[in-house]
Amino acid sequence: MAQFPTDTALAAAQSASVRRINGVLEFDWNRDGNYTHAYSDLSKLALSAVVDDSRLTSQLPSEIQSTTGYSSGELRVTLAGKRAFNEYNALQIFFPYNATSPLVGLTLDGTPVRYSRKVRTSTGGTTVRQFTGFLRQYRINRKTGNVELICSDISDVSADLVTLPRWAVGQGYYTASDNFTSPIDGTWVYEEILRQAGRPTGPATPPGCVAYCSLNGSTLPSVGNMLYTTAPNTHGVYAFAGDPWQQGKYGLAPQLQTNGINDSRDATYAVFGTNQVVTVVPGTTTVAISFWHKSDGTAHTTNVDLNTHPYPGGFSGVYLFLEGGAGVTAFTIQKNGQAQSYTVKADGSVHWQADYDAQAAGWHYYHMLVTFTSTTLLWTLKIDGVTTTSLSVWQPITPWAYVGSGPGYRPPLTNIVQIYAGGPIQHAAIRWSGAGSTPYTTGEENPPTRDGKPLAYVERSALRLLWLPEVYKENAWSALTKLSAAELGATYTDVWGSIHCVPHSSLNADINAAAVSGTIVLTEDQLQDLTIAPTLDARRNSVSISTTERHMVLDILWTQPDAQQFHVLLNQLAAVQIQLDNAIAVNADPTTMYHQAIKPLTPYSKYTTVISAILDNAFSTDATTPTNTNVFADCQMALDQRSMTLIMTGGTLSVSGSTGAYVGSYLGGQDASTQISGTKYSDPSVLSYTYEDLTSIAHNGRRVLPLGENDWIQTSSVAGVVAGAILVDTSVPLPVIDGVSLRADPRIELRDVYKVRVKGVTMPDLIAQVIGLKRSDTLTDSTDSPVLRIAVQPGAAMWDDPLTGWDIGSWSG
Amino acid sequence: MAINRYRFYLGPIGYLTALPPHKRDPSLDASREIIGQLQEGLSGRRTLDIRAFKKVWNLDWDWRLEDELLGILRGYLGFANSPLRIIDPRVRNLLPLNLSTGGSELQATDGFNRTGTGVLTYQADATMPTELQGQLSGEVQLSGATTGDSLMGITETVPLLPYSTYLFTGFVKGSGQWSPAYQPVNAAGAVVTTVWTSALTLTGNWQQFSVSYTSDGTYPQMYFGLRCSASGTVQTTGWQVQIDEYARRPWMPGNGCPEVIVAKFQKKYQGYLRRSGVMTPYHTLNATILEA
């Protein structure tokens, strides 16, 4: 939608024969969002400003004129001169070694910058944003005194590296109907990449966060580790009732389940670990559990107590295990927002419990702060930032006493986090004072913004994922664009610098009567040039597409190749890093710190981790069992799941003739016998599909568009959606209008749909979508050069349902 | 000492001096240039985009002495204090355009500054003072002002020539009581004080106001405007500052006394004339002076 679509004064100024238009160029040198530095406004120095929202670029063949791809904005500005006689000129301001520059001491590159066009109107004037980004590079020319600035609106994102976890559904995908084997939603991947790149679409990861799960299309942790991923049921999406997701407060949220919840199979569910071990020092430690929850507005009922199975439909809860296997601090909630908070001690006894009332229908943000004193627990619940009094509190006479230093599950050391999501609950976070701040801060529940605008918008992805393709320390923008390209969607930035990720169906949906009516009509009064070049090459009525399926399988992840590879001296500790390919999790008892070295099991269990060892003086003897039982070994998987550490001791008990032990060795030191089992991706299974427009083939012959293999296309239903979407664009190809030049209209944005009226040629008006836009302001001239793609075939009907895409044989009109 | 209307005044604030009388032919060029471009659509429709109007003076002199070059040279060579300001005494109204038109030029309050908590806006008005009817599109309005609030034109100061008299006039309507006012400004650019005269009681009909000030050389520059003497709302337009004209003359759009740059200066030797018995060189001069 164009900016200021209903501003009649601006529209009148745009069509007036004389127009006053000026550029406004501002820098946030203080980086506080206020643009109040004395040298923030450098508009008077600007000789020229060019904003280039590049044409949507995709990986499709160049002749395919489709609305898909990625685009980011760049601002190029040339500065010269000075604002006032007693100020420095542009060269003096930007010269990096000018010790008296007003910008000295500031880091110039990366500074937020914004550019607008200000149009005088009958009501005073309207400032219309054209670009928001960051100063990326500046070039100073001594001869001319000019300073050329290059600014990018994605330089923050493109400088960040992102890593996705390894995860896949279990092998029962085709046969099981339970939640353990449901695909996750591609929307989660978009959000996770953006979150890691510093542009969260939900609340920002709070300080002190040790665990965070957005629940935006999956239950994979964003902060935490993939403990327990040896089993597929650790990140389940409950999918009995069709679409498991609904639109949430920020992103997707689980659907409300009406069935009772007996165990983790009856709800969307997650279990994972904190990203570091959470310890409690009585008197100084606080823990906070926070999340968004949508109440259905029903009346208060009796609260649900602990261990009352089944939990009622719509029940949700977040649990942090603090003491052994039973000690837990939890915050649970019913579908009407009625909440219960409690802490259970290591012996399984409840220490305290508080109940809270139901909430009005709609979304509410909960923040429960627990303070561990020496003798008791204190708790404060804020709902929507307001402290809320509990309805009832129960605690035993026995004073609180923390029993230990925490469970320290491995690998690596961690606490277990458990989330039940039987209803719409989102952005669950656990904070610990040992890692940072835990109290509620105003506004923490909302995504960060810039100029009041979200940093990113993500519409629901068409992708449904059985597994996560490898994204490891990859440029965030690159990762986003690959994901978007897979579903033939679009990833682009707007004039506010916000990133938009939209599926192809949304792009098609732009082209409807509502989007077209009442917007700008580009007539030859504004148009200064245009070129249109339809081509047969763009016509494709048969799309071949492949899916790549992989599942989680149990397997041996690593086998020691050499019996005498790891010689560890007495009383010594050795560690070795081992790279893992396609591994998801290492199979090791999470409650045991070290495995005592043992002889191989007989017979070998494929799914058992076995680490053997032998003293180094026992080569020639039948050392069926290590005589030094203090020889230990352990394996710990790295947080990024791409490697593990094998930790070995040489034992502590001195045995005559031995100086240490060979870890991983057996049978006289001649055979290696260590194996690490776990879960990994199965080999890819690639299947091909073809989707066709038979009517078009009958008229024009078969013209194939091969989309090839793509790891992100994993199910046949997704392949059908993607192929159908591109067929809409190609079976009746609509050309791109290029070489368009028009008198600058600052309201125009990428993805806008406009009418184009060419005298004596088009009747009715062409309807075209902006897929690229270059804005140019010089001292004398303001012009725009949009790239337009005709969106609707002139003289023919629009598609019946642009949301569902191609619907051959069912045209209307 | 009244201003010499045949000469331009150029120099830093406090030190504007008269340039030599220019050449007596139509070569004197004092245009307003449009910074912008004419755009032509495929339909042939022409539209004009304007970034700014900037004044340009192209001045010629002949038979000038070396000593008479100083006023130009100090600006051209840059050894005088900056910025240079210019007064063109041929133009009646010394205020900048948007101030003189009650915001009608930019359709905005640019250049107007209010104190207090009142709300300052520009508004179109079909009913202008009689002599401005059809000339201006609107006025600035300061609503909700209380006693002591002011509405001053601060785009630029008006340079004061010692012993010249400045007459500030304009039109007001609205409510409450308002006084024409002026603010002497020192060389450092700080407002020294606000001086106001007897107040007008405003009604819905336009009234004219005026106030004069004769410089005694104490202050080098000045702002003009209005001060609220009893709470109310003022609409005002058609401001004019004349110099050394004791009777108000009809309103003209303001030309300002802008900051300028001597962008070009040519000197040619014209010949020698005997002066006090000495053969003295005379010059022809050409200067291009640009509004900054």
Image (cartoon, coloured by chain):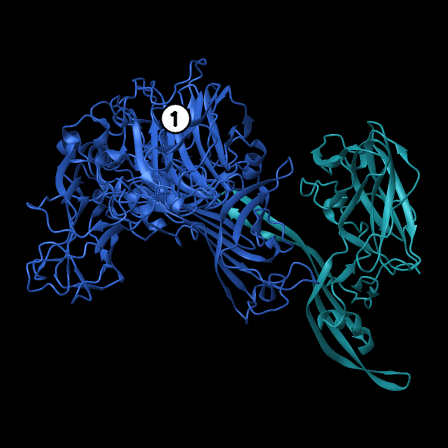
Residue occupying image coordinates x 85% and y 35%: B147
Q: Residue A362 location in percent, x, y?
A: 46, 22
Q: Chain in blue?
A: A
Which secondary structure, mark 1?
A: helix
Q: Please rate how many residues cluster around mark 1, counting C-alpha atoms within 10 Å: few if below 14, some from 14 to 19, many from 20.
A: few
Q: Residue A726 location in percent, x, y?
A: 24, 37
Residue that badge 1 annotates = A513
- Residue A345 occupies which quadrant of the picture? top left
User: Taking A155 as reference, is A415 above or below it?
Assistant: above
Visual hue assigned to chain B: cyan
- Residue A248 occupies which quadrant of the picture? top left
Which image quarter holds the C terminus of chain B? bottom right
Asked whether the viewer can see residue A434, the reply is yes
Chain bearing tag 1 is A
User: Taking A139 as reference, is A362 above or below it?
Assistant: above
User: Taking A91 as reference, is A177 above or below it?
Assistant: above
